[in-house]
Amino acid sequence: MRLSLSAAVVAALVLSVLATPTPRGGLRLFEKRDELPSDFVRNGAAAPDTKLDMRIALKMADRDGLEAALFDVSTPSSDNYGKHLSQDQVKAYAAPSAETMSTISDWLKSEGINFDVNGEYGDWVSFSIPVSQANDLFGASYENFVHVPSDTTQVRTLAFSLPEALHDVVDAVYPTTSIVRPHTGPVRMVEAQLQPTSDIAPGSDASVPSSCNSQITPACLQALYGIPTTAATQSSNVLGVTGFIEQYAQQADLSQFLSLFRKDLPSNTSFTLQTLDGGSNPQGSRYAGTEADLDIEYTVGIATKVPTTFISVGENNADGVSGFLDIIQTLTSESNPPQVLTTSYGFNEPDLGSSLATRICDAYMTLGARGVSLLFSSGDGGVSGSQSQSCTTFIPTFPGTCPYITSVGGTINVPETAVDFSGGGFSRYFNRTDYQADAVEAYLSTLGSTNSGKYTSTGRAFPDVAAMGDNVAIVYQGGTYLIGGTSASCPIFASVISLINDRLIAAGKSPLGFLNPWVYENPQAFNDIATGSNPGCNTDGFPSVAGWDPVTGLGTPNFDAMLSAAGL
């Protein structure tokens, strides 16, 4: 049944109170959401026998110690810069204490629940129970929430509780209060007749031909950012590309793309495949995914000869959160995870409960401490996130708001200006960290009272950097298209980082790892973007200015300057 947002339904939603279930004895409220995301409607209580695959995240033994270690090995001025932690060293911080494990185990056993302990660090427990039992266990009221545009249903609760003793050992419970919009893909895509641009020489804006204003190709990026075409040499320097929601990367499209835009590379240049949760990568035009093709074409096609792995995540239970959790667990369990991971997917931060967002972010911290560079697109809705212009406060995008990853915004044209859909702003959940404090304070002093009350000025600010994000040429289902979205910007920037890592490793140095302290200590390594804005919520959004701004961050890549900043 497809539901519509009638005026009566909307009015009812506005007037209704999202009631908190009354917990049974011994429970205390753990988390509650006060409103539904836009485009969702309530559709009755969930059937009592509906199975829920529950996950509980357990507190790390020493989360603060891990954070300190992350910054210690990631800050260029530190004596320990580049001395990334081993898997066992991270585990000493991240694994729950014996007391925590005993507390959660005793509780679940007392409830007659069989459970599994998951993750490299044993920091998650999982079990399946029917809705009727979940309602009782968590003092919850699970309902059906329908996302009207996609006609998909999520079984969630607006509030849940835990026994008092568990509040000190549990970080998050899923699925509970997260009600998340499905990913919708690139913001702009048009079919176009494209011209090869393989003969452009690297140089300044002045040397980039006007054709790059109408179509961005690898040659345009090589010229604009000084990206080399020489082949990478280090087999250990793997670039990971995430694939969700049945997005499949097509070798035929990649080969055609290389034939058009990287004639110096063999057209059969390929990538390796990694799968989890039943993921796959079937070949054939009908399986092609715009996001997957875009990501693979602008990693293989930019990071010349860098080993590239497409990671296909199969599980998709309407919101995509399970896939995000599982890919983290998979990568943390690997002795040699990718040096760089690019992800073109995300959520409106408020759609996730703060506890779940915080726990996912902390998991990224464990990878950063091991020397993995995590990059996420900043979003394609300006300051509106993924909902309509009707928002009254700005909606930040997660994971871009996580302080332990690098968020990538978008630009357009030559000379570059901020593209109007570039996601950016300030987190509601995460505080600003020291590495960006000076840059953000300088921006806020320039901004003054503009947009006052619409954002959390003390929150983690994003994006950190940017790259071209519109009129980007791709091959999809054998046709040529121009595509727009920060989902183009992210793999481009990630490819640049992979090429720098290749040179660092070849020189006997450590890869860059968690990027942000290095990025903010070296603003001269980026092309500052000082024009444009990211409108949304019926406002002009934030303006892009000289220095850092919440539209394009510190700017776009300057390869030679970045090499110099990396000590090469």
Image (cartoon, grey):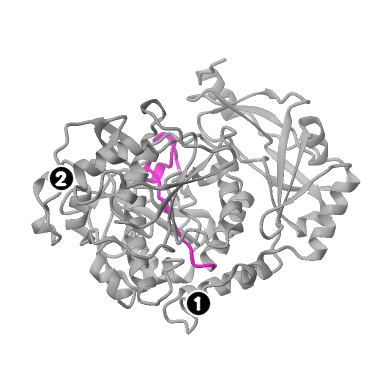
In the structure shown, which secondary structural element does the residue marked by tag 2 occupy?
Answer: helix
Q: Which residues are magenta?
A: 370-392
Q: Which is nearer the eye, 38 or 68?
A: 68
Identified at 57% across, 74% down, the residue is: 68
Q: The C terminus lies in which quarter of the figure?
A: bottom left
Identified at 31% across, 60% down, the residue is: 496
Question: Where residue 514 sits in the image (x, y, percent)?
Answer: 46, 66
Question: Where residue 261 sits in the image (x, y, percent)?
Answer: 20, 45
Q: Is residue 182 above or below residue 103?
A: above
Provide the major secondary structure of the magenta segment: loop
For the residues labelled 1 and 2, say whether their Cβ atoms are less than 8 Å apart: no
Kindly tell me whether residue 380 is visible in this rendering: yes
Residue pointed to by mark 1: 83
Q: Is residue 497 above or below residue 256?
A: below
Q: CA distance from mark 1 to mark 2?
A: 42 Å
In the structure shown, which secondary structural element does the residue marked by tag 1 occupy?
Answer: loop
Would you say 388 lies left or right of 555 here? right
Would you say 396 lies left or right of 534 here? right
Kindly tell me whether residue 552 is visible in this rendering: no
Badge 2, how many Cα within 10 Å: few under 14, some, many 20+? some
- Callout 2 amino acid: Asn
- Callout 1 amino acid: Lys
Residue pointed to by mark 2: 213
